């Protein structure tokens, strides 16, 4: 199965924030890779999903204390 690219708008806006969210996203099964474009005003989180659901990703980011919205 091909990986699916999921995109979310977040408020993860610095390296420290990325570090803070990393352990939460690491626990989500089925994420092969992810990154946050902190230079984009909408702080786009791009996830290469290898089975991870939108819901699991949203929950992980919210647990880390950030806002997230599917786009």
Image (cartoon, grey):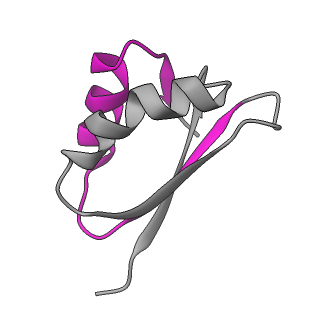
* Relative side of 13 to 23, left or right: right
Q: Position of residue 55 (x, y in %)?
A: 27, 37
Residue range (magenta): 43-69
Q: Based on the picture, tell me whether residue 38 belongs to the magenta stretch.
A: no
Question: Is the C terminus in the top left, top right, bottom left or bottom right quadrant?
Answer: top right
Q: Based on the picture, tell me whether residue 54 belongs to the magenta stretch.
A: yes
Residue appearing at x 48%, y 55% in the figure: 34
Q: Position of residue 10 (x, y in %)?
A: 58, 26
Pick whichever, 52 or 32, lies toward us. 32
Residue at the far top: name it. 65
Residue appearing at x 27%, y 34% in the figure: 24
Q: Is residue 21 visible?
A: yes
Q: Quadrant of residue 44?
A: top right
Q: Position of residue 40 (x, y in %)?
A: 81, 37
Pick whichever, 27 or 49, lies toward us. 27
Q: Quadrant of residue 17?
A: top right
* Relative side of 9 to 34, left or right: right
Above or below, 4 relative to 8: below
* Relative side of 36 to 23, left or right: right
Pick whichever, 21 or 55, lies toward us. 21
Residue appearing at x 40%, y 30% in the figure: 21
């Amino acid at each position: 199965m091909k990986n699916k690219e999921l995109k979310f708008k977040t408020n993860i806006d610095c390296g420290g924030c990325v570090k803070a969210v990393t352990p939460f996203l690491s626990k989500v099964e089925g994420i092969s890779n992810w990154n946050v474009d902190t230079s984009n005003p909408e702080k786009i989180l791009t996830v290469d999903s290898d089975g991870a659901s939108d819901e699991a990703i949203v929950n992980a980011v919210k647990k880390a204390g950030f806002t997230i919205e599917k786009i």
